[in-house]
Image (cartoon, grey):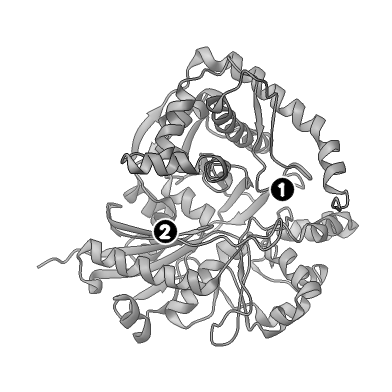
Amino acid sequence: MNNKKYIMGIDNGGTVTKAAIYDLEGQVLSIASNTTRMITPKPFFTERDIEELWQSNVLVIKEVLKKSAIDAADIIGISVTGHGNGLYLVDEQGKPTRNGIISTDNRAKKYVEQWYQSPKFESDILPKTMQSIWAGQPVALLAWLQDNEPESLEKARYIFMVKDLIRFYLTGEATQELTDISGTNLINVRDRCYDDELLAFWGGLSWKDKLPPIKLSTDCCGRITEEIAALTGLKAGTPVSGGIFDISASSLASGINQTNKLAIVAGTWSINEYVTDKPVVDKDLFMTSIYPMENRWQITEASPTSASNLEWFITQFMAADKQLEEAKGSSVYDLCNQLVASTTPDESQLMFFPFVFGSNTIPDATAGFVGVTSFHQRAHFLRAIYEGVAFSHLYHVERLRRINPQLSNVIRIAGGITHSPVWLQIFADIFQSQLEIVDVKEHGTLGAAMTAAVMEGYFPDVFAACDAMVKVSEVIHPQLDKQTVYAKKYAMYKRMLDDMQPTWKSHNHQQPIEA
C-alpha cells in the first residue's frame, strides 16, 4: 500500500496554464500544460477569455492526475500561482463582467503619468506601497475602466488577481492572498492591509467593497468542492492554500532560502530579485513586496523585457521554420540556438531593444534593432535578441546592487532560457557571474506547491520547504575572454537607451497618422 503524500501546484502565466504534482522531496511525478489565447483588441491591450482560462485549468488538472497514476486522495494540498497584476472581474456567481487583463497591458499609461506628477506620491504614498506604479497594475486598469467601461466595474462583485480567481472557482471562497496583492499598489505593504488613503489617491474608494479579505500564502483558503471534484477528478475536501505571487514562487523554486542571494527569472518578464529582512523604500526601485514568511520582503527589479521577445520574433518571422522543424521532430528553439551559436559577439554591433511589450523602466520605450546593414543575417538578429534580453536583466541587477552591495555574484537562474545552453552562456558572459541552475522543470508550480506543504504542517516555513525540495543540477561559468567585448556592447546599449528616450517620447506622443 502506498502511503506517500503529494502536493499539486497550478500556475496561470501570461497565456500558459500548467499543473504539476510533487512529492515532499520535490520530485515531480507529472506535468501538464495548455496554452490559451492572448487577445489584443487594440494596440497595447492584452486580454484573455476567462471561461477559456478556467477550462484550461480543468483540462490540466485532469491531465496531470491521469499522467501521475496516483489516487487523488493522496494529494494533501493544492496551491495556485499566476502572473502578478493584471485584472480579473467577476460577479457574485463568478461570471466574468469582461475579459481578464494580462499584466503586459499598457492601455492605462496616462493614469500612471498623472499619479507620478502628484507631490503626494513620494511623500505619502510611496512609504506605504514601497513600489513603482505601472500600467499593468490593477490600480491603473481599474481607473481606466472607471472612465471607459464603468458598467464592467459596476457589475463586478469581486476584484481578483488571476490565481485568486482560480482558487475561488476551486473552493467557492473569495479571498485575496497577501504576497500577490502586495505587488499591486492596492494595499499598504508597510502595514499589510487595505488603506483608505491609498484607495482615495487612486480614485478608488468605491472599489473597497469589491476587494476580498486578505489571507496568508500558507493559510487554508478553502477546500475542493463536490462540484469541482466531479469536474476534475480531485478529491472533495482537499485543502487549498492561499498560494503565492509568481515572482515569489520562482524565487522559492530557485532555492532562494536566505537573504542576499540573487535570483533571475527570464520568462515573459525580466524578473531580478532577492529576499531581505529590511524593506526598501526607494523611488527608483520597481517593487518591494511581501515574502511568504514573517519579517521577510522581496526586492524586485522587473519589466516585460525578457524571453517573450524571442517568442514574438518566432511568431512573426519564423512561423514556417517552426512548422518545418516540428515536421522533422525538432524544435524551432533548437534552430534559434544553432543560428546564434554560428555567430560570435564581436562580429556584429547589431543591437536590440527588448521592448516589444513596452518597458516600465525606460519611459515610452518601444522595441527595435539598431545598426542593421546588408551584412546582417537572421542569425545576427537572433543573437541581438539573446544579448538584448540579457542586457535588460543586467540593467535591473545593477540597480539592485546599488541598493544592496552585499548581493552574491553567484546567481540562481530560472525561466525559459534555462532550456538554451547557448543563451545561458551569453548570460554568464555578459554578467561575468557564475550561474546556478536548479533541477526544476516548472518553477511556478513547485513554488506554489511548497505553500501547500507548509499549510499542512510538513515544513515549518517556506525556507525549510525550499531546503528540502530544491537541488542545484548545473553550474555555468563565465568565459573571461568575452568580458571585454560584452562590456563594450553593454556600455553602447546604455548610451543608446539614453539617446533614444527623446525620440521615443516624441514618437509615442504624436497623433496617429491619418490617410
286 sits to left or right of 267: right
Q: Is residue 308 above or below residue 188?
A: above
Mark 1, residue position: 360
Q: Earlier in the sequence, mark 2 or mark 1?
A: 1
Seen in the image, is 173 located left or right of residue 30?
right
Is residue 189 at all visible to an observer of this figure? yes
- The residues tagged by marks 2 and 1 sit, at their Cα atoms, a distance apart of 33 Å
Element type where label 2 sits in the image:
loop
Q: Secondary structure at mark 1?
A: loop
What residue is drawn where x is 49% and y is 44%? 319
User: From this viewpoint, which residue is outermost toward the left?
Assistant: 1
Q: Residue furthest front?
A: 515
Residue 373, how many percent across, how many down? Answer: 67, 21
Q: Quadrant of the N terminus?
A: bottom left
State which quadrant residue 380 falls in.
Answer: top right
Residue 274 placement: quadrant: top right
Image location of residue 478, percent across then percent down: 47, 21
| Residue that badge 2 annotates | 461
Residue, x 29% and y 78% (percent of image)? Answer: 235
- The residue closer to the viewer here, 502 or 196, is 502
Q: Residues within 10 Å of mark 1 (few under 14, many from 20)?
A: many
Which residue is pictured at 38% across the width and 53% down the height?
Answer: 464
Q: Tell me if I can see residue 435 in this picture.
A: no
